[in-house]
Image: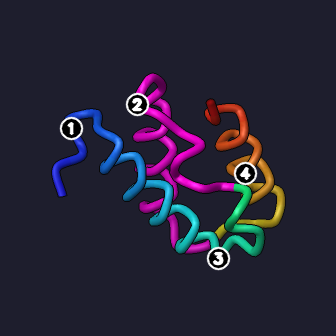
Amino acid sequence: MNLTQPSQENVEYMIDQIKEKLRMVNVDAMKSEHFDDSQYEELLDLYSMVKKRSTFSPSEMQAIASELGSLRK
């Protein structure tokens, strides 16, 4: 998937991948339709960081969830 171009499809893909990687319990809170491509670069940075790591501490997961919350429209 080419994530260099902002699109709603790419936003949906990244959100789904982040949720899967973090095994988020409340996935309804992070629906891809809550995000748009206006903050695409920030979401791409967060996605890249999450994909590079294999494990996360509880505080890191909280920080990631908080950051996703701040990127919601």
Measured Cα–Cα span from mark 4 to mark 2: 18 Å
- Secondary element type, mark 4: helix
> Which residue carries the number 1 mark?
4
Name the residue rendered at 70%, 32% in the picture.
70
Name the residue rendered at 29%, 38% in the picture.
7
| For marks 4 and 2 on the same chain, the one whose residue lies earlier in the sequence | 2
Spot occupied by residue 60 in the image (x, y as percentages of width and height): 74, 55
Q: Which mark is residue 37?
A: 2
Spot occupied by residue 47 in the image (x, y as percentages of width and height): 46, 50
- State the residue lying farthest toward the top: 38
Residue 47 lies within the magenta run? yes
| For marks 3 and 2 on the same chain, the one whose residue lies earlier in the sequence | 3
Measured Cα–Cα span from mark 1 to mark 2: 12 Å
Magenta-colored span? 30-55
Measured Cα–Cα span from mark 4 to mark 1: 23 Å
> Which residue carries the number 3 mark?
23
Left or right for 28, reference 6? right
Measured Cα–Cα span from mark 3 to mark 1: 25 Å
Q: Amino acid at mark 3?
A: Arg
| For marks 4 and 1 on the same chain, the one whose residue lies earlier in the sequence | 1
Frontmost of labels 1 and 2 is 2
> Which residue carries the number 4 mark?
65
Q: Residues within 10 Å of mark 2 (few under 14, many from 20)?
A: some
Q: Residues within 10 Å of mark 3 (few under 14, many from 20)?
A: few
Q: Amino acid at mark 1?
A: Thr
